[in-house]
Amino acid sequence: MSLLIRGGTVVDTTHSYRADVLCVDGKIAAVGPDLEAPPGAEVVDAGGLLVMPGGIDPHTHMELPFMGTVASDDFYTGTAAGFAGGTTSIIDFVIPNPQQSLLEAFRAWRGWAEKAAGDYAFHVAVTWWSESVREEMGILAREHGVASFKHFMAYKNAIMADDEVLVNSFRRALELGALPTVHAENGELVFQLQRELLAAGITGPEAHPLSRPPAVEGEAANRAIRIAEVIGVPLYIVHNSAKQALEAIARARGEGQRVFGEVLAGHLVIDDSVYQDSDFTRAAAHVMSPPFRAKEHQDALWKGLQAGHLHTTATDHCTFCAPQKAAGKDDFTKIPNGCGGIEDRMSILWHYGVNTGRLTPSEFVAVTSTNAARIFNLHPRKGAVEAGADADLVLWDPNGERTISAKTHHQNVDFNIFEGRTVRGVARRTIAAGKVVWDDGVLRAERGRGGICRGR
Ligand code: URP
Ligand code: ZN
Ligand code: ZN
Ligand code: ZN
C-alpha cells in the first residue's frame, strides 16, 4: 500500500523545504523532490499545504475511571477526534489504584486501548509504594517500553503520592533510565482549602480556583524539582498553568537541571472568568485541575514556550458530559475534574502561537510533536518526517479557517472549552500509518487500527 504526497512544503523543527513524501506500508519510504509514484499508489496533492509530523498529544485520559464516573471519550472516539485536528498519536496514563498491581492496571488500560484508531503509548502512575511496585516498574520499563512514571501530588485520599512515594519512585526511575513526571499541586493544601470553602458555604464551581491558587502549584513544582535535584534525575512537569511553576522550572534549568515542562492549549487561551458563569453547567464544564487562571499566567506560559522552558503542548483530554459534571451540583469538590481539547490543540497553537508571531512553524512542529517524541523515547519513529519514520503526517492549511463548536466537533462530549473561536490554520488532511484518516472534512478513522507504540 503506497501513498505519494506531492507538491507540499515539509516543515520540521529546523526548516521548511519543498519535497514530496512517499509512504509505503505505513512507513515513510522517501522524502525528496519530484518522487515517482509507484504503480497503484494513491497520490495526494499537497499544493499550498505544509507537511508536518502528525501531532502527538502527550497527556490524555481516554475512558478514565475517575471521581465516580468514566471519561466520555474512549480510545476510539478520542483518537478519531484527534485525527480531525491533525493529532495522530497520544500518550495516555495508566493509573493504578493504591495497592493495585501496576502490571494489572497496565493490562486493563492496554485492553481498553485496543479500540484506538491511532497509535498510543502509556505513562504509568505510581500511586503507592512497596517492594512489588519497585519490581513492577522494572518490568514495565524493560519489557513493556514504558518510558515515564507519573506522580499525582494532588487528589489526597485517592491517588496522591506523598514525598515518600516521590523519593522512592524517582530513585527507581533513575535506575531504570525512565523519566518521572508530576502533576504539581500541593494536595494537602487543596484538601484543606476545599473543606474551608465548603464550611463557609461556597459550594459552586467558583470555589474550584479558590481551592487551588497558583502558589499551591508553585510549591509542588518546586518541591518536585528539588527532590529530582537531590536524586539527580530529570523531571517532566505536566500541565503547568501558573507563573510560579514556570519560575521554578526556569530557575532550575538556569542552574543546569534537566527539567521539562508541558502546557495545555486551554491554559494558554482561557482565563478564570469561566468559573464566574452563573450557569452551573458551563462553569462546571471548565472544572479541571489545575484550573484556568488570570491573564498574567497565560502571558507567562506563552513566554515560557518561547523561551524554551516549556517543551510540549498537550490537552489533558478528559471529557465529562453535563450529567456527569452534575454530580457536583451542590459540592464543587464532587465535579469530575477534566476538559477536552484533542481535536483543537493544534489549531489553537497555530492560531494564537504562529499567527501572532510567538512561534515559528518549526517551533510549532517542535512543541506539538517532535519534542514529545524525543522526551518520551518515541523519536524518530514518531515526530519526524524522514525515511523510516511512521507515516503519521498532517497536511496543514495555514490559511484554512474553522469555527470551533461542540455542535460540529468529533469529540464524544457535549461541550467545547474553545466554543465559538474562529481559528486560522487547520488540518486539511491527516495521515496515520500511511492512510488518509481525515480527508478535508471527512473522518475515515477505523476502530482498532491503532497500536501501542514503543519507540525505537
Ligand atoms: O482535571 C484534570 N486534569 N483531570 C484529569 C486528571 C489530571 O489531573 O490530569
Ligand atoms: Zn530538516
Ligand atoms: Zn493532572
Ligand atoms: Zn491529566
Image (tube, rainbow, N blue to C red):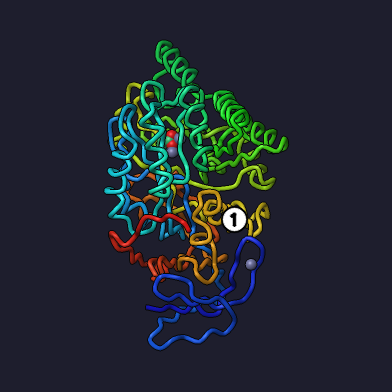
Asked whether 55 or 421 is in front, the reply is 55
Query: How many numbered dots are placed on residues in this image?
Result: 1
Residue occupying the point 65% across, 31% down: 248
Query: In the picture, which quadrant includes the N terminus?
Result: bottom left
With 195 as the anchor, is 398 left or right in this view? right
Dot 1 corresponds to which residue? 366
Looking at the picture, which amino acid does disc 1 mark?
A: Ala
Asked whether 143 or 182 is in front, the reply is 143
Q: Position of residue 374 (x, y in %)?
A: 55, 53
Residue occupying the point 58% across, 41% down: 261
Q: Position of residue 123 (x, y in %)?
A: 43, 43
Q: Position of residue 351 (x, y in %)?
A: 57, 55
Q: Quadrant of residue 14?
A: bottom right
Q: Quadrant of residue 24?
A: bottom left
Q: Position of residue 277 (x, y in %)?
A: 45, 32
With 34 as the anchor, is 156 left or right in this view? left
Q: Is residue 192 above or below residue 98?
A: above
Q: Is residue 321 visible?
A: no
Which SS class for mark 1?
A: helix
